[in-house]
Amino acid sequence: MSVQLAILGFLMEREHHGYELKKIAEERMQGFTDIKFGSIYFALSKLVDQGEVERIRAERDRGRPERTVYRITDKGRRTFKQLLTQNLRQSRRVYMDVDIGVFFGGHLDRGEFVGVLRERLENDRNALKYVRNIREDHHDKEGIPPMAEVIIDHTLHHLRAEIRWLRSLIRRAEKTDIFTPSQIERRKR
């Protein structure tokens, strides 16, 4: 749904060809979406098949391959509004994959468990630096809407919370064995 929402949203602004949609999405949404930018062409084709987007012309620039230009249809505008309001209303619990690893972490010895968590903490710190840099880059670029900074700030808040949680977990795991008795017993074998 996210990739369709992004395509329709960009086409609400103006007509685009596929490669242009991919580049705009990468530039304007980098750092705050998990959209696979390579999936844009597949999703664009599907939107055309569903009548939400239409091909309007082909363009050719100096020695480059022909590019098809797309625009949103009236049906696409209605779908965009529906997807947008659904996205904004939707509130769901986020499940973190790391929680499964923590749950079974007792199958590692305490030092190994803490070591892996420290690696993850370092990775999250690097991710925080990366996203901060993206935010600074967005701030300095023309044509990037201020809303992108707000969205990137959302990612920054999540990363900071994850780092705080990891620090707390590491401190706790260093002081005491936090796992179930059966995990601890199996680990001793």
Image (cartoon, rainbow, N blue to C red):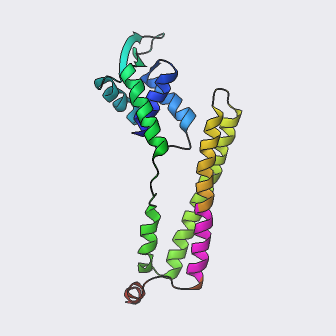
In this picture, is 149 found above or below 50?
Answer: below
Main secondary structure type of the part rendered in magenta: helix
The boundaries of the magenta stretch are 162-174
Name the image quarter holding residue 27: top right
Query: Which quadrant would the N terminus be assigned to in this image?
Result: top left
Q: Position of residue 129 (x, y in %)?
A: 65, 51
Residue at 37% across / 27% down in the picture? 44
Q: Position of residue 108 (x, y in %)?
A: 44, 78
In this picture, is 115 found above or below 81?
Answer: below
Query: Which quadrant would the C terminus be assigned to in this image?
Result: bottom left
The answer to if 73 sits in the magenta stretch is: no
Residue at 61% across / 73% down in the picture? 168
Q: Position of residue 19 (x, y in %)?
A: 45, 24
Asked whether the viewer can see residue 156, the reply is: yes
- Apparent side of residue 68 relative to residue 127 in the rendered image (left or right): left
Name the image quarter holding residue 141: top right
Number of marks in the rendered image: 0
Residue at 40% across / 84% down in the picture? 183
Residue at 42% across / 87% down in the picture? 184
